[in-house]
Image: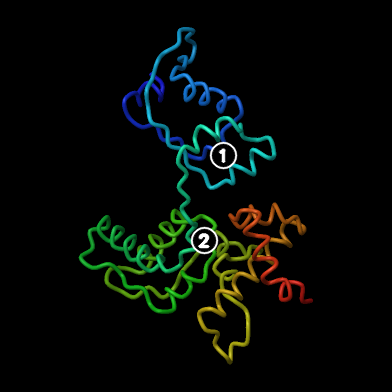
Amino acid sequence: MTSPELAHGGTLFLDEIGAMPWAAQEKILRAVEYGVFERVGGWQPVAADARIIGATNADLPQLVAEGRFMPDLLDRLAFEALVAPPLRERREDIPLLAAHFAARMADELEWSEPPRFSAAALTRLAAYSWPGNIRELKNVVERAVYQTGEGRSITEIVFDPFAAASPNATNASSAAEPTGDKRQPLGFDERIVATEIALIREALIACRHNQRQAAARLGLRYHQFRGLLRKHAAEINKK
């Protein structure tokens, strides 16, 4: 039995629809347009009445313009569009989410008290770009909780555990640390700006200054990346 058939009378959730192959888009469009589909290997149409919700971190209008997503399907799915800003655009939520994930991890480990985040740890969490969004935050917090221990203070945050094991790799946690004069500690806003500049420079170098690839590397839409590039142009272009 296929997903539309199982979802009859309910809701069918399609994750990462921006990565859906063209052939699959055609089948979904037919199901949305006519309320029917065919089972794999079957030839008779099967009716299904389901609410369809799609999710993606891709820019669907841009994919349509590039010929990678069907405009008719986007029109059908865009009956109501909800935009959830990425984590880096709502940094005020990071402490609350980190505490939530820490408490859940402590419950799974059957600890009576979860570790507490130090001010330095919260600053590092807030300064990071979070290309993996909330899922990455969850993984980073769970790792920190497990490595810290019950009821203790979390002082170290590891963003990329694989980089630490490789002498030739750059640790993402190091990339998240802004550069500057260590004798004059930067304030929160200055740390955010310095982090954005460092990450943009790193992405541009890694992608040989291909701005679209650099935007994708950072998990940004192209127009968001271009906005940050214009904002920090003077600093980024410094030798």
Q: Is residue 55 left or right of residue 194?
A: left
Find the distance from the CA under tag 1 to the CA under tag 2: 20 Å
Nearest-to-viewer mark from 1 and 2? 1
Is the residue marked by circle 2 packed among few (<14), some (14-19), or many (20+) residues within 10 Å?
Answer: many
Q: Percent from the top left, x then y, of residue 17?
A: 52, 37
Seen from this angle, which residue lies furthest right? 239
Q: Residue 159 or 56: which is nearer the viewer?
A: 56
Which residue: 38% across, 77% down?
118
Q: Quadrant of residue 19?
A: top right
Q: Percent from the top left, x then y, of residue 203?
A: 68, 61
Question: Which residue is denoted by mark 1 in the rendering?
Answer: 18
Amino acid type at circle 2 is Trp
Which residue: 43% across, 37% down?
53
Q: Secondary structure at mark 2?
A: loop
Is the residue marked by circle 1 packed among few (<14), some (14-19), or many (20+) residues within 10 Å?
Answer: some
Q: Residue 150 or 59: which is nearer the viewer?
A: 59
Q: Earlier in the sequence, mark 1 or mark 2?
A: 1
Seen from this angle, which residue lies furthest bottom? 183
Instruction: Check the image and report above or below for 120 versus 208.
Output: below
Q: Percent from the top left, x then y, of residue 20?
A: 56, 33
Q: Percent from the top left, x then y, of residue 133?
A: 48, 56
Q: Are marks 1 and 2 in contact (CB under 8 Å)?
A: no
Instruction: Check the image and report above or below for 183 versus 116.
Output: below
Amino acid type at circle 1 is Gly
Question: Which residue is denoted by mark 2 in the rendering?
Answer: 130
